[in-house]
Amino acid sequence: MTDVRLVTKRERELKPIVEAALANELRLIEAGMNQTKNAIRAFEKKYQMPTKDFLSRYENDEIEEDMDFVEWIGEVRLMERLQEKAETLKDIRFES
């Protein structure tokens, strides 16, 4: 667990500002996840192959490398990072 303490000289309460910023960041991440999901689905449709199968075949050198496949892998890795960030943001709790 990581603790963060925020302090300001101003009298305005920080909690609502931080909550709004976190909520906005989560919305942006979720929008990115939707775009990434669409890109992955497009590759799956184009190559008539689920991503799981593609990754397995790619890692076993059963597929020749080309730009589409590099982009597909990039989208999968991006999705993993975005999901991790979203989960981290969703886990943040404020203590009184």
Image: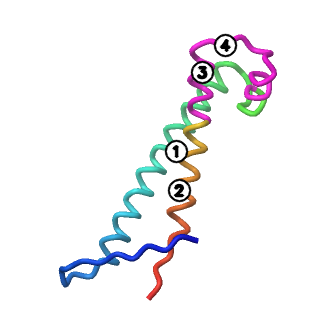
Instruction: Locate residue 24 relative to residue 3 in the image: left or right.
Output: left
- Tag 3 secondary structure: helix
Identify the residue position indicated by label 3 in the image: 70
Q: Residue at x 40, y 64 (%)?
A: 22
Please identify the residue farthest to the bottom as the structure is shown: 96
Identify the residue position indicated by label 2 in the image: 86
- In the picture, the disc for residue 33 is 1
Image quadrant where one finds the C terminus: bottom left
- Tag 4 secondary structure: loop
Query: Which is more foreground, mark 1 or mark 2?
Result: 2
State the separation of the CA atoms marked 1 and 2: 9 Å
Identify the residue position indicated by label 4 in the image: 65
The disc labelled 1 sits on which kind of residue? Met
Give neighbour class at mark 1: few <14, some 14-19, many 20+ (Cα, 10 Å).
Answer: many
Give neighbour class at mark 3: few <14, some 14-19, many 20+ (Cα, 10 Å).
Answer: few
Q: Residue at x 74, y 22 (%)?
A: 58
Q: Which residues are magenta?
A: 54-76
Q: Quadrant of residue 37?
A: top right
State the separation of the CA atoms marked 4 and 1: 25 Å
The disc labelled 3 sits on which kind of residue? Val
State the separation of the CA atoms marked 2 and 4: 31 Å
Q: Position of residue 80 (x, y in %)?
A: 61, 44
The disc labelled 2 sits on which kind of residue? Ala
Q: Which of pointers 3 and 4 lies earlier in the amino acid sequence?
A: 4
State the separation of the CA atoms marked 3 and 4: 7 Å
Q: Residue at x 72, y 22 (%)?
A: 48
Cβ–Cβ under 8 Å for marks 3 and 2: no
Q: Was residue 41 drawn as part of the magenta stretch in this picture?
A: no
Q: Reply above or below: 54 against 9.
A: above
The disc labelled 4 sits on which kind of residue? Glu
Cβ–Cβ under 8 Å for marks 1 and 2: yes
